[in-house]
Image: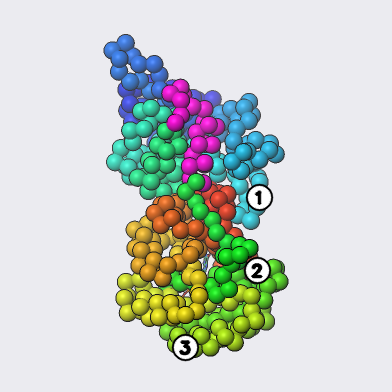
């Protein structure tokens, strides 16, 4: 098997030499710090394989020798993560690479270096965490957030080189600590009877309500009603009415805050009332104020902010910022199936500190919805698959 080790004064220098020597498709297997050279300067070693099959074989051999977090038999690790081969759940089949650092080609690594304007400082101390840093950045987590995550994960680590298994555990624990979860329909006392779904246009609000209505009424046997306040778009109400009709659920429409009050009154026997709103640009102040008038009357409506995971990180931040005037209780991320780079969600969750309630990953009603858990979010974000 063609494995080569490169020693250099910096990781970046070693990567450049591998690129020149083997080419951009060489795979990085490991990175470590060596004892300082005779002139007291840093020395690093990067191990690379000529091609992916050799790298995978090498990695598999290592894993076969030493059970790691990615393959711990049937035992659930203390922090609740398991990523055995072929494990499957509602988020799909999980491959062995999903919850470990994975392998990176020199080409991929150069992109990560480019994006971050160089390699961050913490790698001087923990060079073996390079692949994890690269994994976060390629998953769409911002370089800044990825650096924060790595620093937080490694801050109390001993100075000795850390095994990959230990780094994996630490990173998963840090990211999972940034994710807050709340299920608006199952908390024993604080569950909300009136739940409105708000957000930009076309993010999947109506589809998510249809999925939820099906899950809550057909699977959980709760009495559910739906109300549409989507008076803005032609056909806006019809879309929800069609779904409600299929499920045999009552559907009312409201064109003014007063209408909404009447509709809610008519649904007083329902355990859960889901309220669909018309999507609006967060930049359209008038329409945002209009939405506020509907949501902030005497009715106690909990708002849930729906955002597409495929949205650019900066736009997502602006959307959350503008919709915060409605004080959303949880957020729902949709369209996870439409992007490989779902890490923007992690940036957003860290920023707004709002719990996440649901994730949707496809157009099928009701199948493509997942009640959020730390594990499901981690798996979906880190798998790098659509
Ligand atoms: N791929 C994918 N498509 C989705 C998902 N959720 C919704 N969609 C699709 O996105 C499109 C818009 O969905 P809607 O539910 O109408 O979106 P909306 O937010 O209600 O739109 P407006 O009411 O116009 O603001 C539809 O084609 C849906 O099938 C998802 O999780 N994944
Ligand atoms: Mg809609």
Q: Are marks 2 and 1 in contact (CB under 8 Å)?
A: no
Answer few, some or many: residues within 10 Å of disc 2's Cα (few below 14, many 20 plus, some between 14 and 19).
some
Residue 288 visible from this viewpoint:
yes
- Of residue 300 and residue 170, the one placed in the foreground of this image is 300
Q: Is residue 194 above or below residue 179?
A: below
Q: Position of residue 265 (x, y in %)?
A: 57, 85
Q: Are marks 3 and 1 in contact (CB under 8 Å)?
A: no
N-terminal of the pair, mark 3 or mark 2, is 2
Which residue corresponds to the image point at 32% horizontal and 11% vertical from the top-left?
Answer: 38
Q: Position of residue 157 (x, y in %)?
A: 46, 29
Q: Main secondary structure of the magenta part?
A: helix
Estimate the spatial distance between the alpha carbons at disc 3 and disc 2, rounded to whole Å: 29 Å
Which residue corresponds to the image point at 56% horizontal and 28% vertical from the top-left?
Answer: 58
Which residue is labeled 3 in the image? 258
Which of the two discs, 3 and 1, sits closer to the camera?
Answer: 3
Estimate the spatial distance between the alpha carbons at disc 3 and disc 1, rounded to whole Å: 47 Å
Estimate the spatial distance between the alpha carbons at disc 2 and disc 1, rounded to whole Å: 21 Å
Which residue is labeled 2 in the image? 215
Q: Position of residue 196 (x, y in %)?
A: 50, 74
Q: Position of residue 29 (x, y in %)?
A: 48, 30
Q: Which residues are magenta?
A: 156-176
Left or right: where 329 falls relative to 214: left
Q: Is residue 320 above or below residue 144?
A: below
Q: Please tell me whether mark 2 sits on a helix, a strand or a loop.
A: helix
Answer few, some or many: residues within 10 Å of disc 1's Cα (few below 14, many 20 plus, some between 14 and 19).
few
């Amino acid at each position: 098997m063609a494995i080569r080790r490169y020693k250099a004064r910096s990781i970046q220098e070693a990567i450049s030499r591998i690129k020149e020597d083997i080419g951009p498709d060489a795979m990085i297997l490991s990175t470590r710090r060596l004892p300082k050279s005779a002139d007291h300067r840093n020395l690093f070693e990067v191990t690379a394989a000529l091609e992916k099959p050799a790298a995978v074989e090498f990695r598999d051999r290592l894993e076969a020798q030493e059970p790691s977090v990615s393959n711990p038999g049937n035992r659930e690790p203390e922090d609740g993560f398991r990523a055995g081969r072929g494990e499957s759940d509602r988020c799909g089949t999980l491959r062995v690479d999903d919850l470990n650092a994975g392998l990176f080609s020199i080409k991929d690594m150069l992109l990560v270096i480019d994006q971050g304007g160089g390699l961050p400082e913490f790698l001087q101390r923990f060079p073996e965490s390079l692949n994890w840093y690269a994994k976060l950045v390629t998953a769409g987590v911002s370089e800044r957030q990825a650096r924060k995550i790595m620093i937080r994960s490694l801050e109390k680590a001993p100075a000795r080189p850390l095994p990959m298994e230990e780094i994996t555990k630490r990173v998963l624990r840090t990211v999972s600590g940034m994710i807050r979860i709340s299920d608006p329909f199952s908390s024993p006392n604080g569950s909300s009877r009136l739940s409105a779904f708000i957000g930009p246009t076309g993010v999947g609000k109506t589809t998510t309500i249809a999925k939820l209505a099906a899950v809550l009424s057909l699977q959980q046997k709760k009495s559910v009603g739906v109300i549409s306040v989507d008076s803005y778009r032609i056909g806006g109400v019809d879309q929800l009415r069609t779904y409600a009709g299929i499920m045999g659920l009552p559907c009312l429409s409201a064109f003014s805050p007063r209408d909404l009050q009447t509709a809610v009154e008519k649904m007083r026997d329902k355990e859960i009332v889901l309220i669909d709103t018309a999507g609006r640009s967060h930049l359209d102040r008038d329409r945002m104020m209009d939405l506020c008038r509907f949501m902030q009357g005497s009715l106690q409506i909990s708002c849930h902010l729906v955002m597409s995971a495929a949205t650019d990180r900066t736009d997502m931040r602006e959307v959350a910022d503008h919709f915060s005037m409605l004080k959303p209780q949880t957020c729902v991320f949709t369209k996870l199936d439409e992007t490989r780079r779902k890490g923007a969600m992690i940036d957003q969750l860290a920023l707004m500190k709002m719990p996440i309630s649901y994730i949707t990953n496809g157009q099928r009603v009701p199948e493509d919805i997942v009640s959020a858990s730390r594990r499901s979010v981690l798996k979906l974000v880190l798998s790098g698959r659509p």
